[in-house]
Image (cartoon, rainbow, N blue to C red):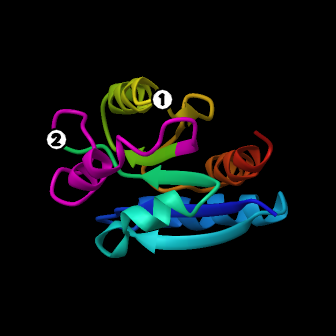
Amino acid sequence: MKKLTIIYWSGTGNTEEMAKLIEQGAKEGGAETRLVNVSEATIEDVEQADIVALGSPSMGAEVIEEQEMEPFVESIEGIVNDKIVGLFGSYDWGTGEWMENWVERMNGCGAKVVGDGCIVNLSPEGEEAEKCKAYGKSLTEV
């Protein structure tokens, strides 16, 4: 059984809801999951997982959250080489450029990013919720 750790930051609850839906999909795919707020996450959480999913909403000028998620991502850049990584988050405006940049950044660190990440406009409802579950399941199939 693959171990998936989902580490996220959420301001309004949208990205947290995405994390829970991704976890549900991953469990359906047979993974053992762990859901962790980035404020409680450690480098060991990443090292000990077979798969890591990182979630952050788009902030400011289309960047990931800068006070907690950005420093955590910087701290793991050297240990994600050859690790399966999922990226997800919600946004309110813009084009999704922040996710494109994040995918490119993590691939540049040697991570095996699954797809183009998973983004949702505002809260994950209906088809968007199903998209999150499907992304979670896809993480277990790599």
Relative to 112, say whether 44 is above or below: below
Please tell me the numbered disc located at residue 110: 1
Q: Is residue 120 visible?
A: yes
The residue positioned 40% from the left and 24% from the top of the image is: 108
Density class for disc 1 (Cα within 10 Å; few <14, some 14-19, many ≥20) is some
Q: Position of residue 75 (x, y in %)?
A: 28, 51
Please tell me the numbered disc located at residue 59: none
Magenta range is 60-86
Query: Is residue 137 covered in magenta?
Result: no
The residue positioned 31% from the left and 29% from the top of the image is: 94
Q: Secondary structure at mark 1?
A: loop
Q: Position of residue 65 (x, y in %)?
A: 24, 51
Q: Position of residue 72 (x, y in %)?
A: 28, 55
Q: Earlier in the sequence, mark 1 or mark 2?
A: 2
The residue positioned 62% from the left and 47% from the top of the image is: 128
Query: Is residue 84 covered in magenta?
Result: yes
Density class for disc 2 (Cα within 10 Å; few <14, some 14-19, many ≥20) is few
Q: Is residue 121 visible?
A: no
- Which quadrant would the N terminus be assigned to in this image? bottom right
Q: Position of residue 46 (x, y in %)?
A: 48, 58
Amino acid at pointer 1: Gly
- The residue closer to the viewer here, 47 or 99, is 47
Which of the 4 image quarters holds residue 13? bottom left
- Which quadrant would the C terminus be assigned to in this image? top right
Residue that label 2 marks: 60
